[in-house]
Image (cartoon, rainbow, N blue to C red):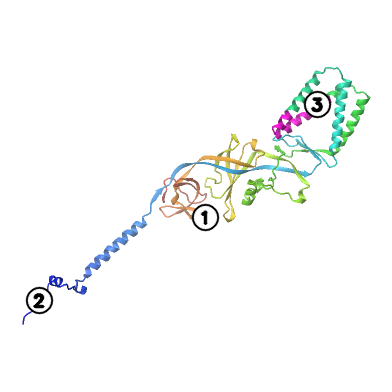
Amino acid sequence: MAVRKRPQASYYRKAGIHRNPSSRRRPRFKFFVILFASLGVLIAVLVLLLQVRPTTTVEWAEARFDETFNGLIVRDEIVYEAKNYGKTKYIATEGQFVHVGDPIIEVYAWGYNDETLSKLLELQKSILKHQTEVRRAGIIDEKLIEINAMVDDTALKIQQAVVEERHSAVLGLERDMEGLLNERMAYLKSVTVPDEQLRGYYASEAEMLSLFAQWRSHLSAKENGLVSFYFDGCEPLMAKQNIGSFTRAGLEEVFAGKTVETPEKDQAYAPLYRVVNQNEWFVVLLSDKHIPEMHLGNSFSIVFEDFLQNQYTGLVYDVTKLEQREGFVYTIIIQDNIGPLLGERRVSARFYGIQEALRVPKSSIQTIDSEDFIETVSGQFIPVQVVANDGDNVLIQNLEGQPSLDIGSKIYK
């Protein structure tokens, strides 16, 4: 019997017949072992690569800060209020330094009236006229000529100050004028021999002056400082004792130029003057975002717009984070003569300076529960305070009483 041979593969191809895939050669067990071993090696390499984190070292560096902010001035001051008076008269001048006991203001109680004052002034004019044109007519008096010249010169200066709206200068000039007029009256009374009419004038003048003395009282300084008679209505809110408790709404009202309304029950009292500590005052900044450089104790050079000739040094005195994500309030203390800023409230100021501290990449900072940490290669989490931005890096400070970083410390990026 003849044995049939298995057809060759070429036979099937020529015949257009496809072989069943199940008839192909099956992979051996050894193939699967090699495949799984290779996959295991690849996974292990990937795990090792992922576990290798980039590291860096802590450096010492400096960062410059130069920004302009709108701010509000808070003064260390005492505002003196009193019952409304019929008339007030300034004795001290705006910006004058006063000591305890120095007279500041002259006030007249209710009952005083301008008609009585007008009568007194007319009487004094009559006295002057009678003294110079009757009793001393034709007498050349060099002393009187000198006083009259000073009176005329001061009157001209007052007129110029009023036209130029230099209100603070007017107060001082008016006081000078009053002194000159009193000096002239006293001099003429000392050198003029009175007649019967002049004695009658003197008697009427004394009676009126006695009446004025009953209405008039003097208020004196109770502490040393600069005196000011100008108010913007924000003094109750923008007071030193309120630092740390300002609200966004309150500060925005002051920025907008609004004033604090006086309750009706307190309207019988009015502010008369304030005495300011000239060497301690504050600038309050309102910011939507956190400013790392504005950390407690950091110092800046400060120049105020419109007062470029004065440069001050300020230290961050208080940092308040407002509730409900309303931003931050930064208060800077300045311990220098307030000078021309005595009457200012809303200001624009340039803050600039150089700060030195430890420097690390921004990516090294990890924030946990609003606190910043840096992880060292040894596995420690060191709490730090970010004190400045420097491009892709930040400057940091160690926290007192906590583990610390040093120059050269190894950390994770």
Q: Secondary structure under badge 1?
A: loop
Q: Residue furthest bottom?
A: 1
Labels 2 & 3 near each other (Cβ < 8 A): no
Name the residue located 88 percent from the left edge and 31 percent from the top edge: 205
Q: Distance between the residues labelled 2 and 1?
A: 85 Å
Residue under label 3: 183
**Please, what is the three-letter code of the amino acid marked with disc 3?**
Glu
Q: Secondary structure under badge 2?
A: loop
Q: What is the x, y in percent for residue 195?
A: 92, 23
Q: Looking at the image, can residue 77 be seen? A: yes
Residue under label 2: 5
Mark 2 or 3, closer to the camera:
2
| Magenta highlight: main SS | helix
Mark 3 or 1, closer to the camera:
3
**Residue 90 falls in image quadrant:** top right
**Residue 109 falls in image quadrant:** top right
Is 17 located above or below residue 72 in the figure? below
Q: Distance between the residues labelled 3 and 1?
A: 71 Å
Magenta segment range?
A: 157-186
Counting residues from the start of the chain, the first of labels 2 and 1 encountered is 2
Name the residue located 86 percent from the left edge and 22 percent from the top edge: 132
Q: Looking at the image, can residue 192 be seen? A: no
Which of 321 and 72 lies nearest the eye of the viewer? 72
Name the residue located 76 percent from the left edge and 29 percent from the top edge: 176
**Which disc, if any, is residue 370?**
1
Q: What is the x, y in percent for residue 220?
A: 76, 38
